[in-house]
Image: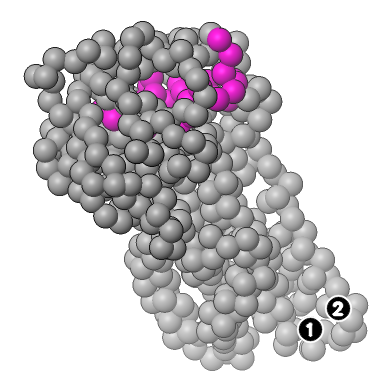
Amino acid sequence: MRGRMSSPRLSTACAAVLRRDLTLAWRRRGDIVMPVLYALIVVTLFPFALGPEEALLQRIAGGVVLVTMLLAMLLALDAMFRGDIEDGSLEQLMLSPQPLALMLGTKILAHWITTALPLIVIAPLLAAMLHLPTAVMPVLLYALLLATPLLSLLGAVLVALTAGTRRSGMLLALMLLPLCVPVVIFAAGAVAAAQQGLPWLAPIAWLGAALVMALVLAPLACAAALRIALDA
Amino acid sequence: MTSLSATAPVLLEARALSFHRQDEPVFGPLDFSLHAGEVALVEGNNGSGKTTLLRILAGLLHLDEGELRWRGQPWRRTEHLGDTLFLGHHLGLKADLSARENLAVAAGLYGTRAGRDVPGVLADIGLAGYEDEPVRRLSAGQKKRAALARLLLLPGTLWLLDEPYANLDRTGIELVNRLLAMHATEGGAALVTSHGAVSFLDGEPTRVRMHA
């Protein structure tokens, strides 16, 4: 179109947004440590509450680790777009000659890297504390690698929808919990099946399918919701 | 520079523009046009809808009623992206990043004007020596300058500046005027809101009055 100077390539723009969000997260390292610490504390408390009986802990290990991870992620979810709305960065992002959905997708990726990835890294340690058999560990990791981005994407849509409201944290948790249920069922189902020596591929495949769908739709929904949130 | 020849092309044209918030009229109907090389001052009291007008023109708010034309074509939000630079009440700066890092992100999203780079722009804008200081530690005026640096660095024909003079000292105000003059001679256009009495450029700017 006339008068338009060539806008930067999409990859350049994505890299700029990703680098900015990762740098910001690194400058506030304390916020990254919080969910990890939370997960560590919760999982450590279980053996104290239930007693050190190995068979019992083994049976609940997969479920406890998964639920703890998902709840730990909830802690940081609220902040996904808040800073950008408050300081006007979101307006600048929206007015840039870049597809908003992809830019928000990049932001969600950055958020996943800074909140979920540290949790996944300590997951084997937490599972081992509850005597989860080593053979099941890979299945737990597959389940987490699919379930956590799915939760980030679903959460992002809800964060975007509640962006206009003050104190959206409570509303967000209430809206997200029903969406968490299928994710937990499939992820924990895979781990339980692997523990019993049953085929575990089907629930993992369901998680994968849901993730693909969320990858395509969630950024678009976020973009639409945030446009509405600023249009007030 | 504000005495325009009638031959300069019309960039932006508004006809009977009006806006309502929950059935309360905010402003309008408003008619104005903006030529290439023209800087217009949007005048009005607090709450007269100056910011709302700029947000509509930026494409952040939905237009209620009236007609907008951009370069002779009906105005569409997506056509406009990257060609309009918006400076709002929220400066769009990350407090934990330095001015240099903030500008690098903006350049990654919008691109840069030919022949401009981040260090040069920061020196021009009067932030030499503060390039690597987190924006959080800058004064309000310096933050404003860091945001104004975007105007100098990024390409864009239409500038929408909401209270660009706020928080600035004498030299800062002159800086804004210098930026506007430069932009106008390069064929750009700007809409500037202000409720204070500012020594606005030289001569008489075009005025858009929010109240009849």
Identity of the residue drawn at 72% across and 59% down: A36
Chain letter of the residue carrying label 1 = A
Residue extending farthest front: B212
Identity of the residue drawn at 50% across and 20% down: B197
Which quadrant of the figure has residue B137? top right
Residue B195 position within the rendered picture, expressed as x and y whole percent measured from the top left:
50, 29
Identity of the residue drawn at 29% across and 30% down: B158
Residue B121's place in the image compared with A15, above or below, is: above
Q: Amino acid at mark 1?
A: Leu
| Magenta range | B141-170
- The residue pinned by badge 2 equals A47
Name which of mark 1 and mark 2 comes first in the sequence: 2
Does residue A126 show up magenta in the picture? no
Marks 1 and 2 sit apart, C-alpha to C-alpha, by 7 Å
The N terminus of chain B lies in which quarter of the figure? top left
Residue A210 position within the rendered picture, expressed as x and y whole percent measured from the top left:
42, 76
- Residues at badges 1 and 2 in contact (C-beta under 8 Å)? yes
Q: Which mark is residue A142?
A: none
- The residue pinned by badge 1 equals A57
